[in-house]
Amino acid sequence: MSALPAAPLIALAGAYGVATDYWDWQGRHVEVSAETLIAVLAALGVSAQTPEQVDAVLADLELRSWRRCLPATVVTRVGWTPWVPVHVSAGTAVAVRIELEDGSTRDALPVDHWVEPRIVDDVEIGEATFALPDDLPPGYHRLVAELVEPALDPTSTTSALIVTPQRLDLPPQLDSRAIGLMTQLYQVRSETSWGTGDFGDLATMAGWAGRDLEADFLLINPVHAAEPSAPMEPSPYLPTTRRFVNPLYLRVEDIPEAQTDEVLPTVRDLATAAHALNAHDVIDRDAAWALKRAALEEVYALGLGPERAADLADFRRREGEGLERFATWCAIADVHGRKVEHWPTEFASADTPEVLAFAGEHAETISFHCWLQWLCARQLAAAQAAARTAGMRLGIIHDLAVGVHPTGADAWGLRDALAGGVSVGAPPDQFNQLGQDWSQPPWRPDRLAELGYTPYRDMVRAVLRDAGGVRADHIIGLFRLWWIPDGGTPAEGTYVHYDHEALIGILVLEASRSGAVVVGEDLGVVAPHARDYLLERGILGTSILWFEWEGDWPKPPEHYRELCLSSVTTHDLPPTAGYLGLTHVDVRASLGLLTRPVEEERAVEWQAIGRVREVLVGRGLLDPSLEVASPDGIRAVTWALHRLLAQTPSRLLAAAVSDLVGDRRAINQPGTSEEYPNWRLPLTDASGHLVRLEDLMSMSSGRALLDALRGH
């Protein structure tokens, strides 16, 4: 039996934001074991193996802030006047100014607030207090404390100052409800796709949806970068980095240099081979990327004209060290494979002399990977432009994954900001009674503050570039994340709290600068105060019809939230046709994932579907004589469910492309890896036939389904 922690260890964990107890999904109070607390504290750089270590850290903790002249980062909001403590040797004169990001300066005002000096490391330290002005503009500024020691030249200390908007207002063009589509981009293949949907397909689909369906947005899966060589991770929610983009989505033919006589025959031959992959019923990313990379390398070898070369150089300068590190990681992976454990030991860190030497020797390969990212940025911008030109009020809404691969580019290049020895997951709940381990390293809250939140800011800014909005997966992770010590089960983890005022504030700041909306995926058990906070900051929530209940009955549509994106289904459920046909029960039964007999599982699901049907019939949205599981019944129920959503006050409503075509297969089966072809199924219709983008655009059901969301 695990030992319970002593009071000093509990105090130490609390000081670092580590939860020492929680309430589980069955309402039981759980006390976190000492072993878990010690392991999680170790991941935060705190040694707490013995009572003596705990006492020493607690004693040192009292003086930690007094050893700093300024806090590492100060986060505030427009209109706030926070007090900032400044620690200096007793008797030292100090002044504080604010260096704004536009180059101007302001003075912080001293506050008449006496704090008793303290002896710190044999030196008497005093605390001066300064108030920040209430009219600072939003942005990333610097605090500068200038010290004047007697008979010494002035010295200064700086720290980050981040001023965020009070809330994220909806963009002015969103003056009424917005209707849109959502899809997994790689699923939607056209005749010219190279085995997966790409950015050319995205531009075409967005143009069609905006022009012919009068859609306001198109929400797609994360397009974060995966590995540069096989085997490529299929899950878009387990990327190698969240800042950069997967070049698998590039449309080769849309690169101007690809149309030159020198490479056009080669590109056409490779495209022909890649087009054959579109006939496969399972997406083969590795085969698609092998052909596409071969074409891209041919095109890259041509070089660029002066204007485009200058644009690429500007892009590399803007993206700076982050891009160079990512490209270096890709170059190393090209040589040594994606498994970091197979790399030379001297490559374990991005800053070693050996890595710097490698970068010099492989500068051309690094330039190739930077060029790929430049192309991705240009093609995503073109897709957004196509969406807006077609009349979409928002355009493309991107998806931000909750974490990254444990051996990927971010885990390597940002290792100083990420915690080692733990992974992110979820505690046991009614849907996953063993809990979940997502195999993702979490941000270290303390290191983010030390770094001025720069890695987080750069990631958010990149995702919002040329976007109408972003969906933040598991947004509750900006409040707290479930950390699981290596070697432990998900049930042996605990929550670690983050500075949500900083993380969400930066998200609001970047979205406001982009004119974008932010949708927080806040499904599951979420503390009411967290949803209240998100509402206060202007972050939209998420509602999935099948998950919205009040007691034993479906929630009335009038009770849905207004500041919300509502839809019938999500990527962790089958499309509506599959859900009504209980395909999710069949799949889970075949894989041994059920926790009760299949007959009982079916009965429970049919009872829920039956109650939803009663609501639809009672509101006059469904003919009571229709059999739900029949083809006509499935189509009628699908349309009726979307008309039910039209009766909600939600500001954003989305229909899944998979529902539009009658697809039945779930794109993801939680709790599986290779047992089910997660994230690898192309779009099919109700009969299981492959659906191309051209087929999709010729269907009348697209307009009909969005009209159902409009209440027509």
Image: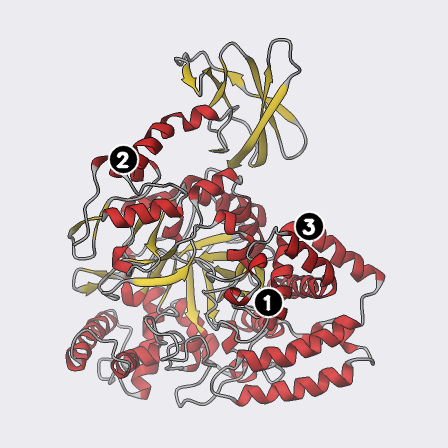
> Residue beneath label 2, please?
11
Amino acid at the residue labelled 2: Ala
Q: Position of residue 644 (x, y in %)?
A: 32, 67
Query: Which mark, by number, is residue 333?
Result: 1
Mark 3: secondary structure: helix
Name the one closer to the observer, 147 or 626. Answer: 147
Say which quarter of the image contains residue 583: bottom left
Give whichever of discs 1 and 2 has the lower sequence position.
Answer: 2
Query: Which mark, by number, is residue 670?
Result: none
> Residue beneath label 3, please?
318
Instruction: Name the image quarter holding the N terminus.
Output: bottom left
Is 637 drawn above or below residue 357 in the view shown?
A: below
Q: Residue at 22% x, 64% y: name it.
A: 430
Q: Is residue 49 visible?
A: yes
Label 1 to label 2, Cα distance in Å?
43 Å
Amino acid at the residue labelled 1: Ala
Viewer-side label of 3, 1:
1
Amino acid at the residue labelled 3: Arg
Say which quarter of the image contains residue 689: bottom left
Q: Position of residue 222 (x, y in %)?
A: 50, 64
